[in-house]
Image: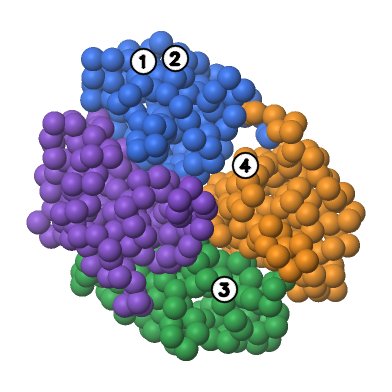
Chain colours: A blue, B purple, C green, D orange
């Protein structure tokens, strides 16, 4: 897998978590379910602390909860690498669910495949359990809004 | 688009909603956000009544909420056409977000593309607003577990 | 499915076929395999005349041939609705193969889900056989390059 | 990214290339465009030697050629890890094109995300150019037909 040594984060994981608590309060309500663990050049690690609320019939973590983790992974990448613009939006996301995940800690290892001026493409390996098996894998695209300086689109 | 007149639902929308309230209480908690409106041969209509809780930064309905609606659309198709086996699971889902959606009623028009013995493929047009514009479109696959009769896989 | 009566093609199917023969000679070489059958507001119909060359192990039409038909469907939509700019490129494509297709005529019914200034999102139902069953379904995105007038990006 | 040390190939790259030449002659016709470079536990490397024939308008390698490389990557994984059953078929493939690729050598680094009895899920990083940049990334699923021993499905 190619390195992305030319990419440089502009925010840390702690700064991202504080930012998300402000701009996206719906995400975690009173509890900390989703959080950024780490931000590094070209990617990040995000975590879901899955409990009863995230389960679906069969007692496994729901597709929606894993989709949200994947989406958050991309969001943390775009916020940390393109700057804290809350208005970047997902334009597409493709997710494969390959194993059932129990409640507990679920980590998403997220990688920027391309950071352009108006689009960011990423993928994420979502792993869980004592052996760190992949439970889902997703690829997605964020649209990055044009920078505005003094009201002018740059 | 081809008709699927050879497919026949085995459950109605009302039966599906009652079933989901029992097997998937996490979905709607105390409120009715997601529900099946209609089941017809080869497809269904599902609805999200989006409120403050479903918004993301920017004040539009979150990708997770639309993903969940798409996933529920497929779930209603598989429950209604392959029988009320709660253990069918999503194996993949691809979603494109094409317009922002405000809170309010959001409808998913879902169509079965293929119903096999072990897999169902579906797509869903998610529409919203007074003019019924497409806000998202998704395609997904459900795995259908083998039927067990008296403990024996059929 | 919502109508797109506000979209208006600027090229006909015949104009598109002539354009593709000029700008994309690799597509059909000496034979006419892929062609636009029809262009209408908000969509188009494209056709693959599959022969021995398009088969894969098992004697069915290859995934690559169906991918190409899906991609051509999007290309015809973007050329016909956004203007004959050969440099629009696919940024993502998701395809589900739901039935095997024999050689012969294979039609793609293509629909524009969103036509923006810089992106077009489409889906396509690929049908084949005497009963017109869906053999594949795809969703994709084309990037539309900025218009240049007198060397200036508009 | 998790290791897959528990997966063991049953065919080498050379055996795969010989097998593909027999079962899938359409792939390479008289020339060697697509080939397996390496097979290792849990994955493989495949290569496209792109020339004039693989270009699209704009002079870059076509989406179809990269789709085919991704699909071949999954095919080599399934043949090498689940056995030389030519009838495994792609059920879905999602591809993102992130940079333009010139003609020349294009390598696909392919990884098995899940190898089940009836499905294999894989992803592939497609890299090109002197700096080995990612030009495309795909995720896909192969259906593995049931083994038949003495005419009986096992």
With respect to residue A127, does C2 lie above or below? below
Secondary structure state at the residue bearing disc 3: loop
Secondary structure state at the residue bearing disc 4: strand
Nearest the viewer among B16 and D19 is: B16
Can you identify the residue that label 4 sits on?
Answer: D114
Q: Are marks 3 and 1 on the same chain?
A: no
Report if residue C147 is visible in the image: no
Mark 2 in CB contact with mark 1 (< 8 angstroms): yes
Q: Which mark is residue A13?
A: 2
Alpha-carbon span between mark 3 and mark 2: 48 Å
Alpha-carbon span between mark 2 and mark 1: 6 Å
- Residue B12 place in picture, x, y as percent: 20, 60
Q: Which mark is residue D150?
A: none
- Residue B22 place in picture, x, y as percent: 23, 39
Alpha-carbon span between mark 4 and mark 2: 30 Å
With respect to residue A37, does A145 lie above or below? below
Q: Left or right: B48 with respect to A122?
A: left
Q: Residue at x 47, y 64 (%)?
A: B116
Secondary structure state at the residue bearing disc 2: helix
Can you identify the residue that label 1 sits on?
Answer: A17
């Amino acid at each position: 897998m190619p390195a992305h040594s030319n990419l440089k984060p502009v925010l840390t994981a702690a700064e991202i978590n504080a930012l998300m608590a402000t701009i996206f309060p719906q995400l975690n309500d009173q509890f900390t379910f989703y959080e950024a663990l780490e931000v590094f050049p070209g990617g990040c690690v995000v975590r879901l602390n899955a409990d009863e609320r995230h389960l679906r019939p069969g007692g496994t973590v729901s597709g929606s909860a894993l989709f949200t983790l994947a989406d958050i992974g991309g969001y943390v990448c775009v916020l940390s690498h393109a700057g804290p613009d809350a208005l970047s939006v997902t334009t597409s996301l493709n997710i494969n669910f390959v194993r059932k995940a129990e409640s507990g800690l679920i980590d998403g290892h997220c990688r920027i495949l391309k950071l352009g001026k108006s689009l960011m493409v990423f993928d994420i390996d979502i792993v869980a359990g004592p052996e760190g098996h992949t439970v889902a894998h997703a690829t997605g695209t964020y649209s990055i809004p044009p920078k505005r300086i003094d009201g002018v689109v740059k």
